[in-house]
Amino acid sequence: MKRLGLLGLLVIVSLILAACGQAATPQPTEAPAPPKTEEPAPPAGAFPDLGGRVVTVAIENAYPPFNYIDEATGEAIGWDYDVVRHICDLINCVPEFKEAAWDGIFPAMQAGEYDWLADGVTYTEERDEIVDFSIPYVTIGQVLLIRADDSIDDVEAFKADPEKLVATQIGTTNEIVAKQHFPEDRIKSFEEFGGAVAALLANDVDAVVIDTVAAVGFIGENPGMLKVGAELTSDEQLAFVFPPGSDLIEPVNAALEQMKKDGSLESFNDKWFNPQVEPVALPDLGGRAVTVAIENAYPPFNYIDEATGEAIGWDYDVVRHICELINCVPEFKEAAWDGIFPAMQAGEYDWLADGVTYTEKRDEIVDFSIPYVTIGQVLLIRADDSIDDVEAFKADPEKLVATQIGTTNEIVAKQHFPEDRIKSFEEFGGAVAALLANDVDAVVIDTVAAVGFIGENPGMLKVGAELTSDEQLAFVFPPGSDLIDPVNAALEQMKKDGSLEAFNDKWFNP
């Protein structure tokens, strides 16, 4: 009935190895998508707009980590809640979650009693005859969930032992798999998986046939009491369910495709399916306003979108996300690069976000966050040029390079070229314009920024030789700033939950 993606699958593999002491790590495979509803995702910003339409979403509230009631707060939470809400943000709908029992849910969906079913549902051809499915959002396997003090050294012996009983949930693909491996008189099927797990903990059964992801959920709900045993299947696809012919399918598919591309789907999977990622208590700044200096001339970190006039980029996305985590309100202030470090030293801004490289010299006058990415510097060149011999290029007195004044890129340029062959500009935009105008032969620039300018000038530029490979970028703060620890805590959490990688993939991957 349910299933997992690459990060979650790797975690499950590690759990199986820990439980069984053997089992080779399987290679992830791309399973074929279910028929129907294979719609290409539109470009970002071109999603179908449902105009704030209310959609009823059937949900079981008994299947962690997809959906369940948090015992501490009484709140309904889980992967389904986060992802459905995120999809509705993208396509402009309002989800109304309705608790529904698993038994009878497919006839209810067929009859149109709900608009959408989110419950870790496995696609099957039989089900597809009466309802419609979205594209798959994750591929998982089914396993034997066992008690932490048990082991399954010989899977076939376990299956052959007439005393061994297994539990599962009635009407699920898990029940189908259980019946493929065990006689029916050795299977106890429950209305909810919670009952099956309770029977396991009470020693009434010896294992639960369950999806890998749900196994992780119940392990998290019962720390130290359960573990993953043997794997039974590995190629089942989970998808959302809709009434036949629903007009929600294409918008939801478009949103899912975009989430796969921008990394947000992987981030949600990592948050809910990875038991090694535990949320930490982050500092709360109480809605405090913070001024963030930003250049607006350094794609993909920060720049003005020519089509919309909007200021966008990695810095905007990540700073806003950090402020969501630590409860602050960013006020972005455009600032010229020249003179920014004395301004930060004097406390004119609370925070500098501009793809800044950490150096010991800079650290003497300002403070830095922990690094958020490690990069290199390259020669950015015209698309119709090439650098077959880097040393020959550097040795040719006719070759000129451009860069931005006061940057580590300028420092590197001076390490490789005489000063009379370097043209330093106030902004990198000027350096790139000089390259396109054939006034210089290359620009010394960070790898990530090179990608940004290549994207801004399609077909006109490319990356040439690499000059460095180990520079760390970080945020900058006035000396002794009380923002540093909260921002560092947020960055650490983003590294763990996958959201930092998702933002990096969105902006740094050409």
Image (cartoon, rainbow, N blue to C red):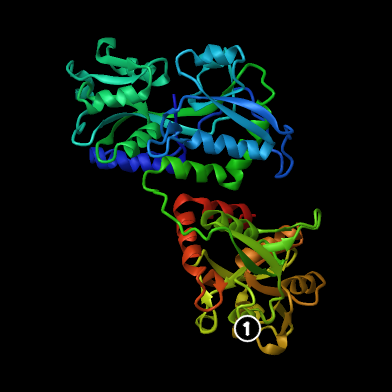
Could you tell me residue 361's position as x and y percent? 53, 84
Q: Is residue 421 visible?
A: yes
Determine the residue positioned at 79% across, 71% down: 433
Q: Quadrant of residue 474?
A: bottom right
In which quadrant of the rendered view does residue 230 lie? top left
* Relative horizontal placement of residue 343, taking residue 164 as reference (left or right): right
* Rendered residue at 61%/31% (across/down): 95
Q: In the picture shown, does residue 73 fall above or below 428?
A: above
Q: In this view, does 291 lie to the left or right of 26?
A: right
Residue 239: image location, x then y, percent: 53, 28
Q: Judge by depth and name the residue closer to the eye, 151 or 419.
A: 151
Tell me the quadrant of the picture where the N terminus can be found: top left
Up the image or down, 337 lies above or below 284; here it is below
Q: Which amino acid does label 1 sit on?
A: Pro
Q: Residue furthest front?
A: 286
| Residue located beneath label 1 in the image | 342
Tell me the SS state at disc 1.
Answer: helix
Q: Percent position (x, y) of residue 401? A: 71, 79
- Residue 470 seen in the current view: no
